Image: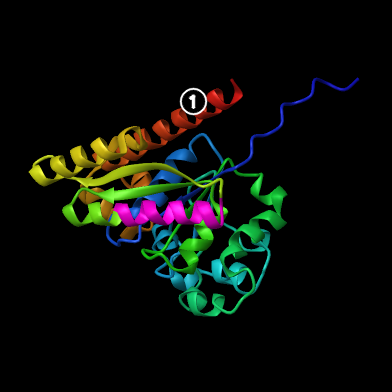
Amino acid sequence: MPGPERPPKKPSRRIAVANQKGGVGKTTTAINLATALATTKRVLLLDLDPQGNASTGLGLPRADRGAGSYAMLVEGRPLSTLLVPTKVPGLDVLTADNNLAGAEIELVDMADRERRLKDALTKEPEVVARYDYVLMDCPPSLGLLTLNALVAAQSVLVPLQTEFFALEGISQMTRTVDRVRRALNPDLSLDGIVLTMFDRRNNLSEMVARDVRAFFKDRVFETVVPRSVRVSEAPSHGLPVLLYDVKSPGAQAYIQLAAELLRRDRARAKATAA
């Protein structure tokens, strides 16, 4: 006699980690948020940045990588043949292979050029369904690679360095999200803004954080990631800071960020079901 039916697995949450401004902690946030989530969830990180820093930061230097995101986006190779396990249990990665730098140019002449990533994920639903979260580390630009992530994602998480020029960048990013929602992906939303590289000794950090919270309100995560030497050191060892020094303030901040994201998701799911 068959047992009780299991409830259907919830679809994967697809989150683009994006900011067109470089040096704001975007890749660091993608690596460490993915690692923290992987303590209780199955996570896939897609490295879509030609710099490949997310792959390196997870212990996969360029010399050791095979085919990756270029092979999927441009050559049309199946995602399932390209995934690589990491040192973090529960976390797999699609690496940024060495040819990815040319993808922006090659994608221009391709059919459905902005939907290549979405199509690749749609073709293998059983592969994507293995994961509770799919995080996409985007380049520091608003080109076709980032656009592919925004079309494939359900939401965008924006790391924001607490410095003056970052305020201008966040306005451009939110306008881009609005344009993509209207033209290409009506389901896209702004998941939230994460304040990074926060220095409590610096009055400017406090001012920027205050201004961002006043404008974006509850879309700004309560968790703030401090400026941390250990966070900066970890990638050179091919490790997320949670494995390099879990007791450091930066590691603890990313653990708190993951917990806050999970709480938000539970609250959103509860509100939708009501």
Does residue 74 appear to the left or right of 236 in the view shown?
right
Rendered location of residue 61, percent (x, y): 43, 67
Q: Name the residue type under label 1.
A: Ala
Taking the spot 39% from the left edge, 69% from the top edge, the residue there is 51
Rendered location of residue 88, percent (x, y): 48, 47
The prevailing secondary structure element of the residues shown in magenta is helix
Q: Is residue 239 visible?
A: no
- SS class, disc 1: helix
Residue highlighted by disc 1: 267
Of 257 and 241, nearer the camera is: 257
Q: What residue range appears in magenta?
A: 170-185
Taking the spot 71% from the left edge, 31% from the top edge, the residue there is 8
Q: Is residue 181 magenta?
A: yes
Q: Is residue 271 magenta?
A: no
**Which image quarter: residue 13?**
top right
Of 72 and 246, nearer the camera is: 72
Of 237 and 159, nearer the camera is: 159
Taking the spot 42% from the left edge, 59% from the top edge, the residue there is 54
Question: Where's the C terminus, which quadrant?
Answer: top right
| Image vertical order of residue 63 relative to residue 46, above or below | below
Q: What's the image's color scheme?
A: rainbow
Rendered location of residue 143, percent (x, y): 44, 68
Does residue 75 appear to the left or right of 15 in the view shown?
right
Does residue 192 appear to the left or right of 198 in the view shown?
right
Taking the spot 20% from the left edge, 50% from the top edge, the residue there is 229
Question: Where's the N terminus, which quadrant?
Answer: top right
Rendered location of residue 225, percent (x, y): 27, 42
Q: Residue furthest front?
A: 182
